[in-house]
Amino acid sequence: RTKFGKVECLKFRPYVQSGRVFKEQESLSLWVSNDLNKIPIRIKADLAVGSLKADLDGFNGLKHQFKIIMD
């Protein structure tokens, strides 16, 4: 769920080098919209010191319609 509503996403968990920046090898998660735009919706990371979470705040000028799931 985003501030725009529900968005169908693909979730990626790339391997990162653990140690200096990231806590573990799978500490990073990235959500991308599952449409033709492939907009990064959210990123979360467990860092060696704390954590990080960033959500999409706005968008404009998209080439394709942005699909929001209405409940």
Image (tube, rainbow, N blue to C red):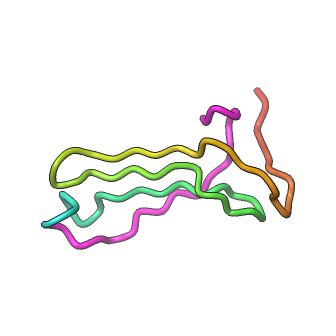
Residue 36 spot, x, y in % from top left: 78, 65
Dominant SS type (magenta): loop
Q: Is residue 6 magenta?
A: yes
Task: Give left or right: position of 5 versus 52.
Answer: right
Quarter containing the C terminus: top right
Residue for point 68% across, 36% down: 6
Which quadrant of the structure image shows residue 62? bottom right
Q: Which residues are magenta?
A: 1-19
Residue for point 76% across, 37% down: 69
Task: Give left or right: position of 48 versus 5.
Answer: left
Residue for point 78% across, 51% down: 60
Task: Give left or right: position of 49 versus 71.
Answer: left
The number of numbered discs placed on residues in the rendered structure image is 0
Q: Is residue 55 above or below residue 19?
A: above
Residue for point 59% across, 57% down: 40
Quarter containing the N terminus: top right
Q: Is residue 23 above or below residue 15?
A: above
Q: Is residue 2 above or below residue 9?
A: above
Task: Give left or right: position of 1 versus 44.
Answer: right
Residue 35 spot, x, y in % from top left: 75, 59
Residue 67 spot, x, y in % from top left: 80, 47
Q: Is residue 62 magenta?
A: no
Residue 11 spot, x, y in % from top left: 52, 57
As drawn, the residue found furthest toward the left would be 19
